[in-house]
Image (cartoon, rainbow, N blue to C red):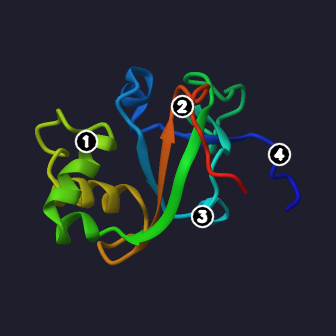
Amino acid sequence: MLGEDIMRNMSFALTIDQILAGTKTVTRRLGWLWLIGKTGVLIQPVRKNMGLKKGEHVLKLRDPIMVVNARREPLRWMEDDTVYGYTECAKEGFGWHPDYKHPSAFINMFCATHKGCTPETEITRIEFVYDYEEVKLPMK
């Protein structure tokens, strides 16, 4: 596919601290369908990617991250299976947060910050690593 070898930027405006601390290893997105089933893709984490004002520039948060898994799932799965939900909140970097460590609060926050999203919405769950020098990916 055209442009697949171009590293893309991904905004982490809502979770800058988690990215900088390296505590976030999963992100949920409404789009990014092209990533489904792909591993080894490098993504540049940035503060803000779209809606930059005149004179603003993309700010890289850290070295690129590597996608190790990307799949579609309903957002509500985090509430349907609470063990999964709490584990995912921690992977999203909110394991310490007084509110967002709870799946229902995380889902409410996600829907409030993503126009048109409901708990029934299918999202793209993207899992990634920061240190990928030693990662062994499946052969293609």
Q: Are marks 3 and 4 in contact (CB under 8 Å)?
A: no
Upstream in the sequence, badge 2 or badge 4?
Answer: 4
Upstream in the sequence, badge 3 or badge 1?
Answer: 3
**Horizontally, is 60 left or right of 7 in the view?**
left
Give the CA distance from mark 3 to mark 1. Answer: 22 Å
Picture coordinates of residue 94, whole percent (x, y): 25, 39
Whether 9 is drawn above or below 121: the answer is above
Residue depicted at x 47% and y 37%: 13
Picture coordinates of residue 86, whole percent (x, y): 18, 51
The residue singled out by tag 4 in the image is 5
Q: Secondary structure at mark 1?
A: helix
**Residue placed most toward the observer, 76 or 88:** 88
Q: Are marks 3 and 1 in contact (CB under 8 Å)?
A: no
Give the CA distance from mark 3 to mark 2. Answer: 23 Å
Give the CA distance from mark 2 to mark 4. Answer: 22 Å
Which mark's residue is nearer the viewer, 2 or 4?
Answer: 4
Residue 40's mark?
none
The residue singled out by tag 3 in the image is 36
**Horizontally, is 86 left or right of 57 in the view?**
left
Upstream in the sequence, badge 1 or badge 2?
Answer: 2
Whether 71 is drawn above or below 46: the answer is below
Residue that extends furthest to the right in the rendered view of this protein:
2
Which of the 4 image quadrants contains residue 47? Answer: top right
**Residue placed most toward the observer, 117 or 71:** 71
